[in-house]
Amino acid sequence: MSTRAQLSETINRLLPGEQNKRIREAILAAASYSGSRTDQLRQSIDLANRLQTGRLIKGEITFDSDTEAELSGYVWVIDFQIFQPTTPTTLTVTAPHPTVERTDLFTGDDAGVIRYYPGSVDALGNSFFPSIPTGEVILEVVTRNPDSSNTVDPGTPSVTDWISKSATALQQMAGPLAISPLAGAIQDLIGTDPNGMLRRVPASRAGVYTTREGDGGFTSGWSKILRITIEPALQINYVITFQVLGVTPTYEKGDMWVIFLVDEDGDIITNSLQLFGSFTPARYKLVKVDNTHYELYLAHDQIDSLYSFRPIMLFGNDWRYEFFQQEEIVENLPAGDQYSFTLFGGLDGREVELRNSGTAIEWRYVGDPDWVNLVDLEEITGQDGDHGLNGWTPVFAVLSDGERRVLQVVDWVGGTGTKPTTGLYVGADGLKVSIGDGVDIRGPQGPAGSGGGGSGTYITDLDTWPVLKFDQNYRYVHEMTGPVEISAQLISPLAVTGNFCKLYIKANGVNKPTFTGDFEVIWDNWVNTAGHWNRLFAEYTPEGKVILQIEQAHLGTANDGTGSTTVTVKFDANYVQQHVVTTTTQIVIDTTGAQVGFETILYIKSDGVNKPFWDSDDVVVTYDNYLNLADVWNRFKLEWRPENKAILQIINT
């Protein structure tokens, strides 16, 4: 008989490696120890090498239809107990989603029953993995495809692999990591630091959030933009700033500041709710909805309005500031205390500048040639003496008083001695205590369009031709008499994304404009026939360049007629109008005060019978896609041109 050393050497040669260590130990124990010790080791080895919980044998799954699956031949183990159904299992399953891939699970439980758990798809198109009860074993993971095909995962499924995976130390991946983006609001992002380590990035500090598109269904519908969770015991100051871009018939853009201080009950003690740029302050409301939450709402009072918001800076924990993505537009604001915003730095989208002329404080819109007298210096300057107010210059802010805009003295600078009183308002004959006595420095409201549409004179005559500017929207009319080289000012803040220049240039048959600088011509249909008008639309983009379209008005089919109902369109401002067709309808052009570049967006609801008429002497059709079906909306865009005609595009919406 071999000695123990010889036996050990032979066993090590036949059963090498750490994985066979306990087997080698059992063989040596059987040769040297009592039977009870051998049995104990054999039992321990048996348990260690057996599957405790999981799929033991992969069976076969077939789908007889979109709603029925059959599984057979599967064997699984739960706590060392083996389960094997003796007959095939037929299950009713959920049909595939029509547009999104969905993951479904098939499991085995501790009663020997095969169960089915479908994944889910939310309204935004996000597919979510199903949850399963603790203790069940995943038998198959199946991707249900929109084309009714099914993809069975070839791997061995595990609850820890599919539900969650955690690690307490640095982990390395042998294969690629695929991450699918979620539609809608993103709660948290994952990024890498300079060392390549994964880091959590709060969504409040990245990304852009948008509202739904306004449908004009309400007189004034509201979108929820932001929720601020307050906790006075830990934080009393709340600050967040973000950029706003409103794609509306009159455009809104700029920065919004939400700053407030609360008391121990969560009530606002003081606030600074400010808008810097081109805004209508009445559209924004901060509401205290309960003792721990304030919510910011936006009024959707214009058709086709769509707003986006990009957070810039916040104070405190980021989770306190929650933005909302495409929230449902509601008809009324929630109950609670309401707080309004104040417009600074611009009036109706136009920048205001002030100066001391030596005899008076004067103001004007940036680009306007004339200065307007606000207040004579002698009315705000004290008498000579030890306590005189000589040399002080007021600092103004623009405040809203309903529909009015009033200048308030918020500070005095540059003087000596005692500083004059702040908080007063500029009145017609001096400084006033009451805001109601302040002078309204905003111009009169533009005329309303028929059918309830609004108007806005947001296009300014370009004063730097042939240099284009994009600090606001401009127009320019030019007749070619020789070579012209067009350039652009593209330095922020003089250039703002989305702003444009409408250029109407009459050809002379010889020269065509040239462009220097960062222009990208995306459409060039210039006609160089003497006397022909060309329309150039230049728009400033986020890439820091200008995209340019050179367009023509191709005469469409005349549609002369007389309607029993008339819709009047004007071009003395920009309008948005609506009309529902119920009988023969005629579009009538009112040329009173018409200015080149102004336009009317006319939404017309068809009755399926009558297509609107217009006078071909006044209208040139560039595109006509009118859909004459009952209750279908069509969009008419009419723009006044130097030819004294309206250019019309008809698009089915």
Image: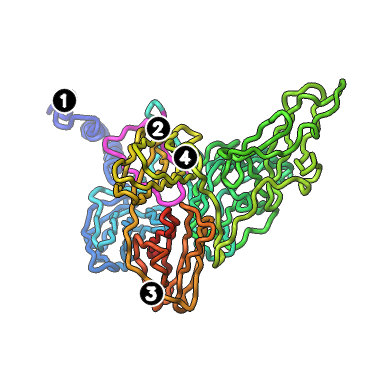
Nearer to me, 109 or 230: 230
Q: Can you identify the residue that label 1 sits on?
A: 9
What's the CA distance linking mark 1 and mark 2? Answer: 52 Å
What percent of the width, then of the height, locates residue 540?
A: 42, 41
Of the two numbered discs 1 and 2 on the same chain, state the one appearing first in sequence.
1
Please name the residue shown 81% across and 22% down the image: 417
Helix, strand or loop for disc 4: loop
Q: Is residue 369 left or right of residue 464?
A: right
**Residue stretch in magenta:** 170-193
Q: Tell me, yes or no, whether the two marked residues, 4 and 2, touch with CB atoms within 8 Å.
A: no
Between marks 3 and 4 in the image, the one whose residue lies nearer the viewer: 4
Q: Amino acid at mark 2?
A: Thr
Q: Residues within 10 Å of mark 2 (few under 14, many from 20)?
A: few
Q: Is residue 368 left or right of residue 492?
A: right
Q: Can you identify the residue that label 2 sits on?
A: 192
Q: Amino acid at mark 1?
A: Glu
Of the two numbered discs 3 and 2 on the same chain, state the one appearing first in sequence.
2
What's the CA distance linking mark 3 and mark 1? Answer: 92 Å
What's the CA distance linking mark 3 and mark 4? Answer: 41 Å
Between marks 1 and 2 in the image, the one whose residue lies nearer the viewer: 2
Q: Residues within 10 Å of mark 3 (few under 14, many from 20)?
A: some
Helix, strand or loop for disc 3: loop
Between marks 3 and 1 in the image, the one whose residue lies nearer the viewer: 3
Q: Can you identify the residue that label 4 sits on?
A: 470
